Image: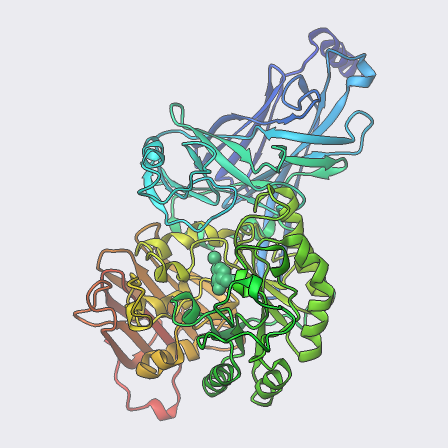
């Protein structure tokens, strides 16, 4: 043995760089990863059931003013291990999650030909975790002499595709994710950028083939591939840039104001780069890969974190019926600390009377919270960000009596939800944060919807760069110290950090319902979001719109929501979130109380979830069991095509009769012409029931299910 080792060492000395192939496979053997160093360059590839998924792709990181971590590597050591544990999320789609993977840890040594040997040696570890539904890998930089502080110029992680796949993509952009999805071949992506105006693609797009993650792909052989990242902490968010001749994606990090892409200090790691793969689209939706790659919960006590449903003073501003601001005066004419001389515009949404109306509505229909936007001074010039008009997050407008309204809400078993629009002035928010949280605690608030609209201040930073990403997490962990839950809009797209910090109960970070009141969204949008944006964590999508013609709310707004009422109901099930809004106006729900019943009944926390049918861009059907009960909720959505869906109920307990209430599109329903046509039917079902349910164009269905009792004896079978 000793002699063999000496011989091997001799070989190392002679050839300089040893080339070796390291392998690991998933616990069930379906997925295989291979790693190799070829002529000094690290590379990996992935197969699924023997088919190539990621062709040999290089790894590395280019540094600013330093020898790059891209070449002259050799394998120093490789270690294999396996892991299997089951953990319980604070809230989630399932009450327990299995985290089972096989790991390959490859320690690399880099030499620098320009330096004396000992001064040039540096070390990088690549860690692969291979799951039954995909692979995660990251770069790790152990503490060492020759790599201490370093600045990332670009990350060179490649994902080489095997062909011209279909992609469900939105354009690469450092500052917004609020795009409609495009479904196209990889080779067609460039043509959409050539017509950027038509597709509303921002002029700041970094390249003509840049896309955001989570990116969903489908091969012609029917493989579903998803590329994203997990545990984005102290690093820039990754986009993907496509070489569309060879179909190779390469990571493209968000730069800072100087064009740098990250400031690191060893010991440290990058986020995980993730590749999910399956021949069944439902597996992609059911995957917990991203959550599993995140660290366990960082808090000892999580009893204060609660899933919830809310209504809010919001849609009326989004549609333009009322305003966030108290006056119409330009900011220069208002003394912000004294509104007594300012003339109210008469359309301020967050006024005492209106807030009480929403509190009454929430209390009557069992909602937990009422969001009130536009309660605080500063909205007159909030997006102009004049020096004097940044928000302080503590001064209410004169017609919002913060003390009285919170007491009124609490007397009815409801809480108000705080709103912090930062207008991208993150430093200003950090300065006022303590006082803002103190004010919340004083009045009994325990949740915030925050927002980062507009250019980032200090100017030049981008929404998804390292600096801003650190701010978003700082806001979440600071809030936790006060037992406050956070739902941040316009923040970086989530990467599973809600496992570690479960008071991050929501994010927007994609095109939400608000765009239906701006320019409309494509009907297929909600059949893609669960494959993409929702991989990293729940979305505050704000569903529940019942009146689609926005001119009925504001005659000057001719926008139209491309959906049916039943499609809206289904979203409470298909778009998993522990935080769900009923976004429409109370007076609209009062017109359709029978359909509204589903939103009142539907749960927000679950013991089990099953994806019954799914195809990105076409349809999704999900069934979930409400936490701690025997009640189930089912939702189905379709794209712009009508379709019949056969639903089997074999997820129900055998031998038990259940009462099901089905909310389905009416015969003439159609998102464009008759969105409010629906039927509601109640009857008995069992685990053997099969129903054929018609979905209208842009439509859907929702079902609430509970065990039958003696009182239900006369009910007939649901057909
Ligand atoms: C954009 C958010 O997405 C929206 O929900 C909010 O009402 C506005 N910003 C104002 O903060
Ligand atoms: Ca938004």
Which x, y percent locates residue 11? Answer: 72, 10
Residue 505 seen in this snapshot: no
Q: On screen, 177 above or below 513? A: above
Residue sticking out furthest to the top: 14
Residue 423 seen in this snapshot: yes
Q: Residue at x 57, y 58 (%)?
A: 97
Q: Residue at x 50, y 71 (%)?
A: 327
74 relative to 210 in the view: left or right: right
Residue sticking out furthest to the left: 668
Residue sticking out furthest to the bottom: 711
Quadrant of image for the N terminus: top right
Q: How many marks?
A: 0
693 relative to 429 in the view: left or right: left
Report the colour scheme: rainbow
Q: In the depicted view, which residue is nearer to us: 184 or 376?
A: 376
Q: Residue at x 36, y 45 (%)?
A: 200
Q: In the depicted view, which residue is nearer to us: 374 or 597?
A: 374
283 relative to 157 in the view: left or right: left
Q: On screen, 103 above or below 713? A: above
Q: In the depicted view, which residue is nearer to us: 327 or 109?
A: 327
Which x, y percent locates residue 74? Answer: 68, 19
Q: In the depicted view, which residue is nearer to us: 531 or 313?
A: 313
Quadrant of image for the C terminus: bottom left
Which x, y percent locates residue 451? Answer: 55, 59
Q: Residue at x 51, y 81 (%)?
A: 355
Q: On screen, 338 above or below 117? A: below
Q: On screen, 178 above or below 546? A: above
The quarter of the picture where residue 222 lies is top left
């Amino acid at each position: 043995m000793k002699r063999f080792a000496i011989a091997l060492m001799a070989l190392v000395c002679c050839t300089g760089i040893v080339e070796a192939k390291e392998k690991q496979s998933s616990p069930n053997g379906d997925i295989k990863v291979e790693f190799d160093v070829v002529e000094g360059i690290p590379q990996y590839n992935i197969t699924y059931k023997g088919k190539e998924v990621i062709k040999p792709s290089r790894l590395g990181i280019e540094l600013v003013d330093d020898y790059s971590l891209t070449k002259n590597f050799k394998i120093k050591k490789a270690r294999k291990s396996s892991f299997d544990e089951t953990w319980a999320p604070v809230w989630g789609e399932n009450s327990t999650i299995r985290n089972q993977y096989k790991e390959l840890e490859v320690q690399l040594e880099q030499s620098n030909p320009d330096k004396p040997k000992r001064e040039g040696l540096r070390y990088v570890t690549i860690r692969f975790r291979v799951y039954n539904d995909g692979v995660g890998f990251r770069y790790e930089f152990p503490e060492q002499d020759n790599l201490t502080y370093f600045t990332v110029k670009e990350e060179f992680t490649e994902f080489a595709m095997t062909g011209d796949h279909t992609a469900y993509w939105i354009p690469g952009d450092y500052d917004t994710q609020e795009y409609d999805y495009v479904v196209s071949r990889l080779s067609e992506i460039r043509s959409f950028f050539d017509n950027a105006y038509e597709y509303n693609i921002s002029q700041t797009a970094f390249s003509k083939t840049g896309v955001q993650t989570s990116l969903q792909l489908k091969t012609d052989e029917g493989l579903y591939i998803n590329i994203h990242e997990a545990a984005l902490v102290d690093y820039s968010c990754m986009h993907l840039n496509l070489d569309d001749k060879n179909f190779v994606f390469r990571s493209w990090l968000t730069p800072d104001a100087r064009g740098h892409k990250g400031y690191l200090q060893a010991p440290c790691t990058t986020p995980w780069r993730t590749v999910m793969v399956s021949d069944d689209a439902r597996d992609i939706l059911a995957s917990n890969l991203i959550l599993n790659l995140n660290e366990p919960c960082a808090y000892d006590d999580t009893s204060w974190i609660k899933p919830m449903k809310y209504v809010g003073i919001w849609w009326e501003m989004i549609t333009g019926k009322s305003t966030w601001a108290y006056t119409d005066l330009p900011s220069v004419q208002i003394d912000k600390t004294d509104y007594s001389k300012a003339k109210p515009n008469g359309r301020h949404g967050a006024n005492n009377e209106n807030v009480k109306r929403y509190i009454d509505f929430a209390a009557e229909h069992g909602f937990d919270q009422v969001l009130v936007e536009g309660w605080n001074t500063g909205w007159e010039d909030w997006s102009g960000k004049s020096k004097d008009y940044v928000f302080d997050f503590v001064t209410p407008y004169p017609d919002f009596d913060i003390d009285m309204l919170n007491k009124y809400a609490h007397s009815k078993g409801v809480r108000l939800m705080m709103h912090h629009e930062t207008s991208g002035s993150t430093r200003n928010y950090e300065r006022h944060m303590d006082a803002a949280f103190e004010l919340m605690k004083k009045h009994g608030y325990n949740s915030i919807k925050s927002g980062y609209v507009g250019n980032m201040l200090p100017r030049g930073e981008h929404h998804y760069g390292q600096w801003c990403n650190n701010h978003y997490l700082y806001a979440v962990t600071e809030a936790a110290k006060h037992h406050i839950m956070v739902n941040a809009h316009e923040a970086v797209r989530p990467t599973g950090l809600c496992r570690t910090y479960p008071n991050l109960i929501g994010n927007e970070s994609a095109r939400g319902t608000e765009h239906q009141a701006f320019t409309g969204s494509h009907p297929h949008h909600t059949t893609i979001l669960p494959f993409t944006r929702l991989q990293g964590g729940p979305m505050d999508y704000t569903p529940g719109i019942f009146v689609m013609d926005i001119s009925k709310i504001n005659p000057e707004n001719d926008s139209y929501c491309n959906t049916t009422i039943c499609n809206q109901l289904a979203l409470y099930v298909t778009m998993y979130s522990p935080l769900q809004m009923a976004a429409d106006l109370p007076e609209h729900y009062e017109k359709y109380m029978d359909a509204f019943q589903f939103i009142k009944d539907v749960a927000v926390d679950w013991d089990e979830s099953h994806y019954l049918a799914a195809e990105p861009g076409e349809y999704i059907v999900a069934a979930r069991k409400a936490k701690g009960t025997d009640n189930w909720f089912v939702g189905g959505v379709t794209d712009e095509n009508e379709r019949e869906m056969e639903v089997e109920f074999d997820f129900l307990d055998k031998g038990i009769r259940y009462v099901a209430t089905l909310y389905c599109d009416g015969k003439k329903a159609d998102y464009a012409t008759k969105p409010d046509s629906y039927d509601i039917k109640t009857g008995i079902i069992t685990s053997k029931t099969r129903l054929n349910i018609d979905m209208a164009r842009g439509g859907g269905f929702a079902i609430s299910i509970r065990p039958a009792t003696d009182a239900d004896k006369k009910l007939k079978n649901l057909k």
